[in-house]
Image (spheres, coloured by chain):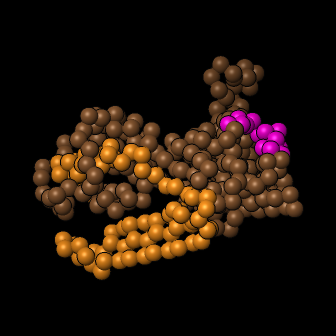
Chain colours: A brown, B orange
Amino acid sequence: MATVRAVIAVAASRGWLLHQMDVKNAFLHGELQEEVYLDQPPRYEDMSHPNYVCRLRKALYGLKQAPRAWHDKIAEYLVTIGFHMSNADHSLYVCKSDEGIVVITIYVDDLIVGGDNEKEVEHVKCLLKQKFDMKDLGELKFFLGIEVIKTPEGIWLLQRQYALDMLSKYGMVGCKPISVPLNQNGKLSADAGEVLEDATMYRKIVGSLIYMMITRPDLNYIVGLES
Amino acid sequence: MQVPRKPHLDGVRHRLRYVSATADYGLFYEASTELQVHGYIDVDWAGSISDMRSISGFMFSFGSAVVTWSSKK
């Protein structure tokens, strides 16, 4: 996510446009390098060869190599249309030309396409749509539960809606808000108080707080105390 | 943490109350701020009384807001 935030920072400063796309059935695009076989699917058996098995040519959801196969597939395509993969982060692709710059960041099947030239950005989106089955979501507004709000002064990244949903999920809507994240009794110790019979709720809340940290560095220290 | 206890659950509920007061906090990347990287680091040299371990942290900003950070025991 640091890469996504860095791209947003550059976009805010340089006035880039930011668009969003998602890939339908992303993992079905990947080509398999390994031999993978499966039984004939029920009701689709070949009656004359009931003992035959099928060999997979492309990846399926649930295969452990599916995410990797998909990444390789889109990386290879982006390179053929002129992008360079970043050495620091293999989910970042940059294409510079006389017409301008286009930057793509990929988060599994969500893509952010940014750049300083609208024609170039549209061109790249067009190529991607032809190659993969993609949905063009237009201007970047909502990405993995994060609100992206563009104003004349800059760009906001907020998880306001995620925060509100989290509070209602854990029954904390009417709670008394506090402006300081630490409790007064301070330090937690590993062996005080009774052991929770069911720690599921506790773990879920910690998980949600960790996700909240995408736009909230102020939560890092206090969540670190808990997990 | 292997065995969560009641005070831990109370702790995370407290965090949620903080989140409820600050739900509209976020990162703002200002257009007019120059794109420069600034980095800050800190360690507390075994500041934890109970186990003598350290907390180390860093943050790097790019323009007006941070892009990467960490706080770890």
Kindly identify the residue that appears in the image at 70 percent across and 54 percent down.
A16
Q: Can residue A109 be seen from the camera position used here?
A: no
A146 on left or right of A212: right
Residue A150: x, y in percent? 60, 47
Kindly identify the residue that appears in the image at 52 percent across and 45 percent down.
A146
Kindly identify the residue that appears in the image at 26 percent across and 44 percent down.
A177
Residue B55 drawn above or below residue A106: below
Please say whether residue A129 is one of the residues in the magenta stretch.
yes
- Front in this rendered view, residue A1 or B31: B31
Residue B59: x, y in percent? 46, 69
Residue closest to the far bottom: B45
To which quarter of the image does residue B43 belong?
bottom left
- Front in this rendered view, residue A103 or A51: A103
Please say whether residue A138 is one of the residues in the magenta stretch.
no
Residue closest to the far right: A98
Residue A209: x, y in percent? 37, 49
A198 on left or right of A134: left
Q: Can residue A61 be seen from the camera position used here?
A: yes
Kindly identify the residue that appears in the image at 16 percent across and 58 percent down.
A184
Look at the image and tell me in which quarter the C terminus of chain A lies.
bottom left
- Front in this rendered view, residue A52 or A14: A14
Residue A134: x, y in percent? 73, 37
Residue A71 drawn above or below residue B50: above
State the predominant SS element of the stretch in magenta.
helix
Residue A22 drawn above or below residue A97: above
Residue range (magenta): A122-137
